[in-house]
Amino acid sequence: MLNVISICCFAGREDKLSADNRKVVDNYQVELSEQISNLFNRVASCLSQQNVHLQGVNKLSQSRLEAHNKVSYCFVLLVLQQSMSYVLSVA
C-alpha cells in the first residue's frame, strides 16, 4: 500500500513539475516573440531612416555632378572661344 501511495505522490509531483516547466516554456516563448517583434520594428525603422538619408545623399550627389558638368561645359566653351580667337588673330 505504501508503494502505491509513493507512486501516486511521485506521479503527482512529476505532473506538477511538467506543468511548471510548460508555464516556463510558454512564458519564454511569449517574451521571445515580443522581443523579436520589437527587434523587427527597430530594424525596419532604421532601414527606413537609412533609406531617407541615402536618398538625400543621392540628391546631393546629383546636384554636385550637375554643377560640375555645367562648370566643365563652360570651361570647355571658354577654352574653345580663346583658341578660336587666337587662331583668328594669328591668321
Image (spheres, helix red, strand yellow):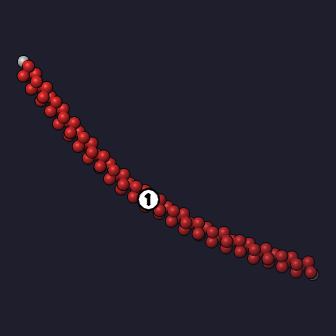
- Amino acid type of the residue tagged 1 in the rendering: Cys
Q: Which residue is mark 1?
A: 46
Q: Residue at x 43, y 56 (%)?
A: 47
Quadrant showing the N terminus = bottom right
Image quadrant in which the C terminus is located:
top left
Question: Is residue 23 left or right of 17 when viewed as pictured?
Answer: left
- Percent x, y for residue 13? 79, 77
Question: Which residue sits furthest right?
Answer: 1
- Up the image or down, 82 lies above or below 90; here it is below
Across and down, in percent, residue 77 comes to 15, 32
Seen in the picture, residue 12 relative to 37 is either above or below; the reply is below
Q: Nearer the viewer, residue 41 or 2?
A: 41
Residue 52 is situated, as x and y percent measured from the top left of the image, at: 36, 56
Residue 29: image quadrant is bottom right
Q: Is residue 82 left or right of residue 38?
A: left
Q: Give whichever of 81, 62 is nearer the camera.
A: 81
Residue nearest the viewer, comparing 74 with 12: 74
